Amino acid sequence: MFDSHKPCCFDSASARRRRLGHRGSVTLEFIVALPILIIALFAIIEYGLFFANMQQVALACRVGAKAASLTDELPPAPDSVPTQIVDAIGQQLGCSGIAPSAIFLEHDVFGSEQELVTTFDSDCACAPPSSPLPSPPGGARSVRITVCVPMGQLAPNCLAVFGFDLAHTMVKSTTTFRYRGSPPCQPAHEKPPQT
């Protein structure tokens, strides 16, 4: 039976030690988990911004490829990329505050593959794809645009503090379109038949 007149005693010293031990373990867990949480947070921010801005680079590459596919009489190598194509890419990237390091234009309008290059950064260590330019069916011609951008323009280098430095990394996006401009043998006002 329970005796209601008997006082209930607590050992206040042992209860205090348990509370202090619990506080110490929570503090230790926090100290161990905090760097991992900070790294995870920085990684989420950095890669989220990277992928969002990489979409802008891919869109600019697509805009440049469309402009190249509609450009009459593309120049042969070793000329630079025509200004209307560079301007189209620059305007698209400029909306996001990104500037390209290099733009490569490959085309087979003359029957053989030509590579045109415009570089904005002399230290650009980027190259176009090594694969040959794909040929659309029916003897049509194609153009391929490659846009190179420094990784530092796409995302903040938050993880450099933890040893994941991406400052000197180049990223590129490539798009291929069918050439729809006038071939070099025909005058610009005569369009080739659409297939």
Image (cartoon, rainbow, N blue to C red):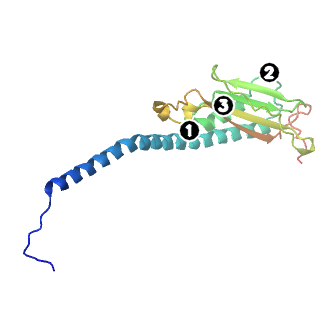
Q: Amino acid at mark 1?
A: Ser
Which residue carries the number 2 mark? 78
Reading the chain from its start, which is encountered first: label 1 or label 2?
2
Q: Amino acid at mark 3?
A: Cys
Q: Position of residue 130 (x, y in %)?
A: 78, 31
Reading the chain from its start, which is encountered first: label 2 or label 3?
2
Q: Position of residue 9 (x, y in %)?
A: 12, 64
Describe the element under mark 1 as helix, strand or loop: loop
Quick check: 74 above or below 63?
above
Describe the element under mark 3 as helix, strand or loop: strand
Q: Nearer the viewer, mark 2 or mark 3?
A: 3
The residue sitting at the left extreme is 5
Q: Residues within 10 Å of mark 2 (few under 14, many from 20)?
A: few
Quick check: 86 above or below 50?
above
Q: Is mark 1 in CB contact (under 8 Å) with mark 3?
A: no
Reading the chain from its start, which is encountered first: label 1 or label 3?
1
Which residue carries the number 3 mark? 148
Quadrant into which the N terminus falls: bottom left
On residue 12, the disc is none
Q: CA distance from mark 1 to mark 2?
A: 30 Å
Q: CA distance from mark 2 to mark 3?
A: 19 Å
Describe the element under mark 2 as helix, strand or loop: loop
Q: Position of residue 83 (x, y in %)?
A: 71, 28
Residue 35 image-quadrant placement: top left
Q: Position of residue 59 (x, y in %)?
A: 66, 42
Which residue carries the number 1 mark? 96
Q: Amino acid at mark 2?
A: Pro
**Left or right of residue 42: residue 24:** left
